Image (spheres, rainbow, N blue to C red):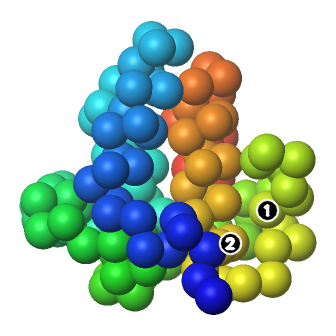
Amino acid sequence: MKPRVFTTAFSGIYPMYIQKAERKGRTKEEVDRIICWLTGYDEQGLQAQVDSGVDVETFFALAPQINENADKIKGTVCGVRVEEVEDPLMQKIRWLDKLVDELAKGKTMDKILRA
């Protein structure tokens, strides 16, 4: 059985990423930049996915290009080491969670985007 997050609408999770960032003084634009960096969507493509109501699995399946530096994302999210997640889709979800966590914790965009 698939984890529930796979079948959750991305449009349901996306506002939570924004709220988490905004509570810490960061912006929707920064969240969008992180998502676009990781997935290869441009602003219009990201908004189209949010508007279409696709689930998380489809959102990542349709992603134009997962960033070649995504494997540099290390650390823990909810006690799980993102680099040790076996399922490829779950790892992408954890990568995105980790990047938004870093944003909320005040890291610079250069560090978050592994520049």
Residue ID at (40%, 19%): 22
Helix, strand or loop at label 2? It is helix
Front-lying residue, 22 or 37: 22
Amino acid under label 2?
Answer: Gln
Query: What label does residue 91 carry, if any?
Result: 2
Circles 2 and 1 in contact, beta carbons < 8 Å: yes
Q: Is residue 47 shown left or right of residue 88?
A: left
Residue ID at (62%, 20%): 106
| Quadrant of residue 59 within the rendered picture | bottom left
Query: What label does residue 101 carry, if any?
Result: none
Q: Position of residue 102 (x, y in %)?
A: 65, 35
Q: How many marks?
A: 2
| Quadrant of residue 44 within the rendered picture | bottom left
Relative height, residue 4 to residue 19 (above, below): below
Query: What label does residue 82 carry, if any?
Result: 1
Amino acid under label 1?
Answer: Val
Q: Residues within 10 Å of mark 2 (few under 14, many from 20)?
A: some
